[in-house]
Image (tube, grey):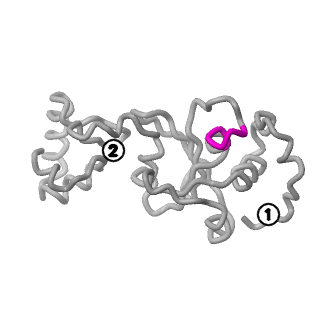
């Protein structure tokens, strides 16, 4: 485990360890069990781990795990959790909501649950409506895109405290 510090990687997957240490999957899984028991590793989600040495990650958002949980998929924070961050919903959602080109589903992590909702459409146009958060290593929807996603998902628009969403011409967003 002392070799992990050299990689400066706080979040990692079993496949990462297999490459780093050039060991079989069985050997890696046994080592993980031992290191979890000793507190050197914390299980973040299925197949995803945090270095116990760098436990500063524990005070962060579950969004830090999204690039690892959906590698190769375009994902961004949206829906209720993003609108709450923007102050348009006063309630704090019990799950972090993420739009993704990957499959829908809910994943439990050590930092909280993440609900992935599949989106389709022109991703280049959606990307223009996001801002990249370098600390999370992922994009976040702006107000309009988060409202549009919530509108398309047909859920919880009544939670939005402003009536501004009623004034949007949703047909202009077609193809997003």
Residue interval drawn in magenta: 83-88
* Residue located at (69% from left, 66% from top): 121
Above/below status of 42 relative to 19: above
Q: Position of residue 80 (x, y in %)?
A: 66, 40
Is 85 covered by the magenta stretch? Answer: yes
Tell me how far mark 1 sits from mark 2, CA to CA.
36 Å
Position in image of residue 97 (x %, y %): 59, 43
Residue at the disc numbered 1: 173
Q: Quadrant of the N terminus?
A: top left
- Please tell me whether residue 156 belongs to the stretch shown in magenta: no
106 with respect to 110 (left or right): right
Which of the 4 image quarters holds residue 44?
top left
Q: What residue is rendered at 39% in x and 34% in y?
A: 59
User: Looking at the image, do the residues carrying marks 1 and 2 touch, with CB atoms under 8 Å apart?
Assistant: no
Dot 1 falls on a residue whose secondary structure is helix
On residue 48, the disc is 2
Counting residues from the start of the chain, the first of labels 1 and 2 encountered is 2
* Residue toward you, 4 or 69: 4
Q: Which residue occupies the foreground of this view, 114 or 133?
A: 133
């Amino acid at each position: 485990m002392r070799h992990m510090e050299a990689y400066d990687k706080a979040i990692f997957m079993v496949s990462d360890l297999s490459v780093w240490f050039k060991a079989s999957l069985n050997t890696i899984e046994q080592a993980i069990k031992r290191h979890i028991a000793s507190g050197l590793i914390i299980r973040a989600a299925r197949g995803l781990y945090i270095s116990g040495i760098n436990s500063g990650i524990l005070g962060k958002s579950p969004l830090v795990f999204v690039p690892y949980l959906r590698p190769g998929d375009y994902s961004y924070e949206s829906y209720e959790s993003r609108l709450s961050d923007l102050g348009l919903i006063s309630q704090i959602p019990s799950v972090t909501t993420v739009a993704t080109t990957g499959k829908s589903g809910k994943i439990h992590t050590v930092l909280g649950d993440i609900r992935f909702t599949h989106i389709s459409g022109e991703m280049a146009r959606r990307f223009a409506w996001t801002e990249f958060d370098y600390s999370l290593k992922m994009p976040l929807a702006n107000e309009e895109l988060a409202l549009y996603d919530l509108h398309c998902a047909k859920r919880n628009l009544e939670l939005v405290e402003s009536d501004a969403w009623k004034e949007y011409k949703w047909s202009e967003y077609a193809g997003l």
